[in-house]
């Protein structure tokens, strides 16, 4: 584990158990989806460089693209100033939304 992720990992307040993670396209910076991540999902994402999340509904971890092969390859992991939310910048794949769309953010007011 590199020094930065080691420090961040211990600065995170893990009493909350899960944290929001925003998935963003590395090249055009478009928001693609919002998911939740646990301690072990974060570690797995860091080491394998592919997104791994926590399902609040199923109460288990899941990997984006595991069945569909729409893998999200992580280029950069960013934390906010309070270290309580995360951004994964990814090399985009075909579809990120489970409704077979590029982005989950498709509704506008």
Image (cartoon, rainbow, N blue to C red):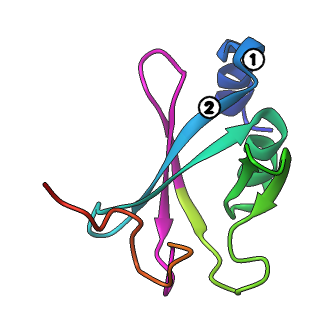
- For label 1, the residue is 14
Which label number is shown at residue 54? none
Above or below — where is 101 with respect to 97?
Answer: below
Across and down, in percent, residue 46 comes to 72, 49
Give 33 or 109, whichever is nearer the viewer. 109
Label 2: how many Cα within 10 Å (few below 14, some 14–19, many 20+): many
- For label 2, the residue is 19
Residue range corresponding to the magenta coloring: 76-96
29 relative position to 95: left or right:
left
Would residue 90 be counted in the magenta stretch? yes
Residue depicted at 78% across the width and 83% down the height = 67
In the displayed image of the protein, which residue is found farthest to the left? 109
75 relative position to 59: left or right:
left
Label 1: how many Cα within 10 Å (few below 14, some 14–19, many 20+): few
Quarter occupied by residue 26: bottom left
Give the SS element for disc 2. Answer: strand
Above or below — where is 37 with respect to 4?
Answer: below
Across and down, in percent, residue 54 comes to 75, 47
């Amino acid at each position: 584990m590199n020094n930065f992720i080691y420090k961040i990992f211990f600065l995170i307040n893990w009493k909350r158990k899960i944290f929001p993670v925003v998935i963003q396209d590395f090249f055009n910076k478009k928001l693609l989806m919002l998911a939740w991540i646990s301690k072990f999902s974060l570690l797995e994402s860091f080491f394998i460089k592919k997104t791994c999340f926590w399902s609040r509904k199923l109460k288990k971890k899941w990997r984006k693209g595991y069945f569909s092969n729409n893998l999200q390859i992580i280029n950069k992991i960013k934390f906010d100033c309070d270290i309580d939310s995360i951004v994964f910048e990814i090399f985009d794949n075909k579809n990120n939304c489970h409704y077979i769309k590029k982005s989950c953010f498709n509704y506008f007011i």
